[in-house]
Amino acid sequence: SYKDFGAQLLPSWIDPFDMAFRKGVNNEADRYEVVRIIINEGRMVKLLSPFITSGTKKNVPESDHANTLLYYGIDAEEFRDILRMHNIYSGYIFLVDGIGRVRWAGSGEGTEEEIHSMIGIAKDLTKRLQKQLPQSQNPRIGKRVK
């Protein structure tokens, strides 16, 4: 559907990020995590949730199911406003540090320049963290929200 358009744009960001950090030469998968948050709003959305969940499972790679959060509610305007996600038809990408601060944000289809910027900032944050911590520690750059 037309609202899936945003989700279809996310691989333009996620795939290069995965290659740079989670699957590439410097495989640091234990330090980085991609979390998908899918917001479904509307009065009828609770009734349609089984169909939405089924469709989401088909569109999201099985390896990412554990890191995919589905939100069903009447209105998520406050949440979207805080993160400046005003276009409900676009996909949004956020680089979040280990304590939950948004360090970089983008939306739509990632351009080469934007992707380079996102990866550069992620590498810079990692270098800064490594300088601050003893070598014996190998922290995750982010934690799963439970």
Image: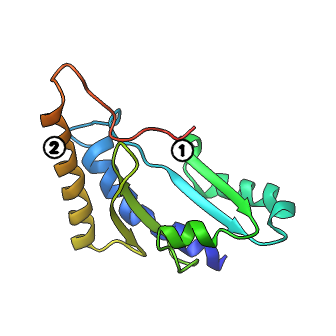
Q: Amino acid under label 2?
A: Arg
Of residues 61 and 98, the one drawn nearer to the viewer in this rendering: 98
Quarter of the rendering containing residue 71: bottom right
Q: Is residue 23 visible?
A: no
What's the distance in space between the residues labelled 2 and 1, CA to CA? 26 Å
The local crowd at label 2, few if under 14, some if 14 to 19, many if 20 or more residues have their Cα within 10 Å, is: few
Residue under pointer 2: 128
Q: Is residue 10 left or right of residue 59?
A: left
Q: Position of residue 8 (x, y in %)?
A: 51, 68
Counting residues from the start of the chain, the first of labels 2 and 1 encountered is 1
Query: Which quadrant is home to the C terminus?
Result: top right
**Which one is in front, 61 or 21?**
21
Q: Quadrant of residue 45?
A: bottom right
Residue under label 1 = 67
- Give the colour scheme of this rendering: rainbow
> Pointer 1: residues within 10 angstroms few (<14), some, or many (20+)?
some
Q: Residue at x 62, y 73 (%)?
A: 77
Q: Position of residue 55 (x, y in %)?
A: 70, 59
Which type of secondary structure does the marked residue at label 2 adopt? helix
The image's mark for residue 26 is: none
Q: Nearer the viewer, residue 2 or 98?
A: 98
Question: Can you tell which of label 2 and label 1 is closer to the viewer?
Answer: 2
The extreme top residue here reads 136
- Name the residue type under label 1: Asn
Expressed as whole percent of the image width and height from the top left, the position of residue 134 reads: 16, 24
Can the viewer see residue 113? yes
